């Protein structure tokens, strides 16, 4: 490494930096603060949309940029503003929904706009958000009448596991969009082609003149694999999805045992 310490820490939230219930331990807050004092930048890299970031930023003291919606959005934390969005074209979203519904009957669909989640009646999943952020529409056809940017198309099944949905989607429409999942039961996440966490973090680092070898990354789900393998030091959490544990040689303890803090304490002692 050209620097004694990593220059950038890229961390997922759920199942990684956060404990169950979305809390951040005092030990994790201390470890992040120590890293920042040593000159490192902390970047949150999450499947979640920007509206989730403010509370986490307040709890951890993290400022700067967050990569949201699996890489589709860059969010500037302090002014609370979205810097850029890579959206899925409405015509593409509608076509994909039709193709996916044929592959996996019984799917329900929702669209994530970055500010809100709009869903049709067949979409059974509730994200437990403030009511203002979850907004039902009367029918699937009505979902396509909304003139809103689509940051993610969400497809939920009560029959198929998320892994199965990703495989089906790849087979039916590989190349037309980016398909992934972040551990939500039966939840497929669809982004514009080429949108990944790795792509977003790589662009961010290029802007700052930071090489992959100067980045330490943490994650637990298949949607984290892209940036865990891109970073010079990629760590799978002890509680990570089997695919992540199989692909990422470095690992730390679980999110409940402050796995991120354990590594940062070693790197920034």
Image (cartoon, rainbow, N blue to C red):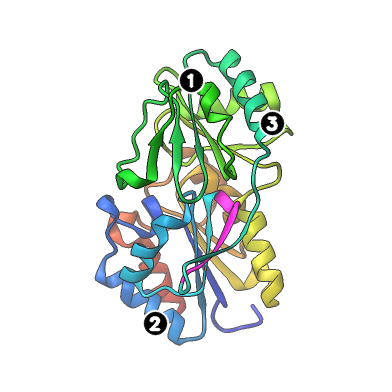
The quadrant the C terminus occupies is bottom left
The answer for how far apart the CA atoms under marks 3 and 1 are is 18 Å
Q: Which residues are magenta?
A: 70-77
Q: Kindly identify the residue that appears in the image at 37 percent across and 50 percent down.
A: 15
Q: In this rendering, which labeled residue sits more in front, label 1 or label 2?
A: 1
Q: In this rendering, which labeled residue sits more in front, label 3 or label 1?
A: 3
| Residue 197 picture location, percent across and down | 59, 53
Q: Which residue is mark 3?
A: 91
| Vertical arrangement, residue 182 with respect to residue 86, above or below | above
Q: Kindly identify the residue that appears in the image at 25 percent across and 71 percent down.
A: 26
The quadrant the N terminus occupies is bottom right
In front of the other: 162 or 254: 162
Q: Kindly identify the residue that appears in the image at 57 percent across and 78 percent down.
A: 7
| Residue 42 picture location, percent across and down | 49, 72
The answer for how far apart the CA atoms under marks 3 and 2 are is 47 Å
Mark with earlier residue (3, 1): 3
| Residue 120 picture location, percent across and down | 45, 26
| Residue 159 picture location, percent across and down | 42, 17
Q: Which residue is mark 1?
A: 107
Mark with earlier residue (1, 2): 2
| Vertical arrangement, residue 136 with respect to residue 80, above or below | above
Tell me, yes or no, if residue 60 can be seen here. yes
Label 1 crowding class (10 Å Cα cut-off): few <14, some 14-19, many 20+?
Answer: many
In front of the other: 84 or 251: 84
| SS category of the residue bearing label 2 | helix
Q: Are marks 1 and 2 in contact (CB under 8 Å)?
A: no
Label 2 crowding class (10 Å Cα cut-off): few <14, some 14-19, many 20+?
Answer: some
Relative to 148, is 30 on the left or the right? left
Q: Which residue is mark 2?
A: 34
């Amino acid at each position: 490494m050209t620097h004694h310490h990593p220059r950038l820490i890229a961390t997922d939230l759920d199942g990684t930096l956060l404990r169950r219930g979305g809390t951040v331990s005092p030990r994790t807050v201390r470890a992040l603060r120590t890293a920042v004092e040593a000159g490192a930048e902390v970047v949150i890299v999450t499947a979640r949309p920007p509206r989730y970031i403010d509370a986490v930023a307040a709890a951890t003291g993290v400022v700067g940029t967050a990569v949201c919606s699996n890489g589709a959005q860059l969010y500037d934390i302090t002014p609370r503003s979205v810097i850029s969005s890579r959206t899925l074209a409405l015509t593409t979203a509608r076509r994909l929904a039709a193709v996916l519904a044929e592959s996996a009957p019984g799917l329900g669909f929702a669209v994530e706009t970055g500010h809100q989640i709009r869903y049709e009646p067949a979409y059974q999943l509730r994200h437990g958000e403030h009511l203002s952020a979850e907004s039902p529409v009367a029918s699937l056809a009505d979902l396509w009448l909304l003139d809103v940017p689509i940051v993610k198309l969400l497809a939920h099944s009560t029959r198929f596991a998320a892994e199965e949905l990703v495989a089906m989607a790849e087979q039916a429409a590989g190349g037309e969009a980016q398909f992934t999942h972040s551990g939500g039961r039966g939840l497929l996440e669809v982004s514009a082609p080429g949108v990944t966490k790795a792509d977003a973090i790589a662009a961010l680092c290029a802007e700052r003149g930071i090489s992959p070898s100067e980045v330490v990354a943490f994650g637990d789900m298949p949607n984290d694999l892209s940036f865990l393998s891109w970073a010079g030091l990629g760590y799978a959490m002890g509680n990570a999805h089997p695919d992540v544990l199989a692909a990422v040689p470095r690992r730390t303890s679980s999110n409940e045992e402050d796995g991120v803090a354990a590594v940062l304490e070693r790197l920034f002692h």
